[in-house]
Image (spheres, rainbow, N blue to C red):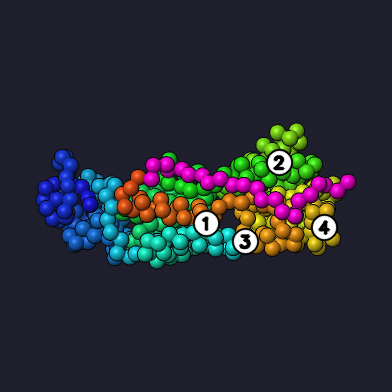
Amino acid sequence: MVTGPTSRARQKEGATSQPASRGTATLAEIARQAGVSAPTVSKVLNGRAHVAPATRDKVEALLRNHGYRRRRGIARPRPSGLLELVFHELISMWATEIIRGAENVARQEGLTLVLSEVAGREEMGQPWVDGVLTRDPAGVILVMSDLTAAQRDLLVSRDVPFVVMDPAGYPADDVPSIGTTNYQGGYSATRHLLELGHRRIAVIGGPESVLCSRARIDGYRAALETGGVACEDRFVRHGTFQTEAGHRIARDLLAGPDRPTAIFAGNDVQAMGVYQAARELGLRIPEDVSVVGFDDLSVSSWMGPPLTTVRQPLVDMAEAAARVVLDLGRGVDPGMRRVELATNLVVRDSTAPPPA
């Protein structure tokens, strides 16, 4: 549904109107100014697909100038029957858990789950936005990604509901997001190692720009401070959440003098790299070095030795994100715009007191 400045527009487009102001125009006049047909203007106004991006931008600018706007909070049917799940990077078992959660809800709702990847970029590109508008999904779940203000406004203007899961940065106040207690998870992991007697504890986070990584490292720092242990800069490293980064950084940490007796890896995938580095250096886990991960992927319990890790409920997070975005598409206010699900420490065999 849309609102516009004239009764003529309302009769033609099924819209309600706002009081007319100087400089308002009918849709036909806007079409003439844009050099397009009136049906094209109607498509843009009602958020329909099959309009060239440049033409859409020109028409939207004219519509805004003349006071047309879409009525908010009214659901409209989605003929595509799609639920879109977007990864900044589609990697390994971590992504599999999220896909499983989103698919659970899609199946219950009779929707088809569509996956896309933005090739490691945390910010969506305009071609991706144009593709979403063409597909017209029932909702979009963005995993560890961010939208610019302009892209956000564009999706909102077309009534495409979206939610951010595990956001890369701090989402705007009006952007729904589903996350987990990353700070508490980092604190719990480090506190566990301190209670075992470790004092030289290193951390291998993810990219410095990613919110969840910063929160986990903040929890690590807070646990050290609470435990009366100084945080040494040489023990704070940033990786990529990939196995290769865990391996490379762990080799550097463990090969040097006065090496750490424990490593808190920012995720289970990097912990696998730590395991590999320890083996190559002839170090035993946990006798020579303890390792803690984050995520509790299914493979964690099968590693040798089974990995102590912080469990974040990835399936539950994805299910919650899917339900929120579908509610938004139905015009249902989710109430809370920022949701964090709890983490908990799962202790297995990769941690022990430090060597004497």
Kind of residue at badge 1: Val
Contact check, label 1 and label 4, Cβ < 8 Å: no
Is 142 located above or below residue 230 in the figure? below
Type of residue at label 3? Ser
Query: CB of mark 3 within 8 Å of CB of mark 2?
Result: no
Q: CA distance from mark 1 to mark 3?
A: 12 Å
Type of the residue with mark 4: Arg
Left or right: where 181 falls relative to 246: left
The structure residue drawn at horizontal position 71% and vertical position 34%, both measured from the top left corner, is: 225
Label located before the other in sequence (2 or 1): 2
Q: Which residue is mark 4?
A: 284
**Residue labelled with disc 3:** 298
Q: Are marks 3 and 4 in contact (CB under 8 Å)?
A: no
Asked which secondary structure carries label 2, the reply is: helix
Q: Which residues are magenta?
A: 334-356
Whether label 2 touches label 1, CB < 8 Å:
no
> Mark 3 or 2 closer to N-term?
2
Residue topped by disc 1: 315
Nearer to us of marks 3 and 4 is 3
Q: Position of residue 308 (x, y in %)?
A: 70, 53
Q: Amino acid at mark 2?
A: Arg
User: Whole-Å distance between the Cαs marked 1 and 4?
Assistant: 32 Å
Given contact means CB atoms under 8 Å apart, are the residues at marks 1 and 3 in contact?
A: no
Drawn side of residue 161 relative to residue 194, left or right: left
Q: CA distance from mark 3 to mark 2?
A: 24 Å
> Label 2, on which residue?
191
Q: Which element carries disc 4, helix, strand or loop?
A: loop
Q: CA distance from mark 4 to mark 2?
A: 22 Å
Give coordinates of residue 87: x percent, y percent. 50, 59
Q: Marks 2 and 1, how far apart in space?
A: 26 Å
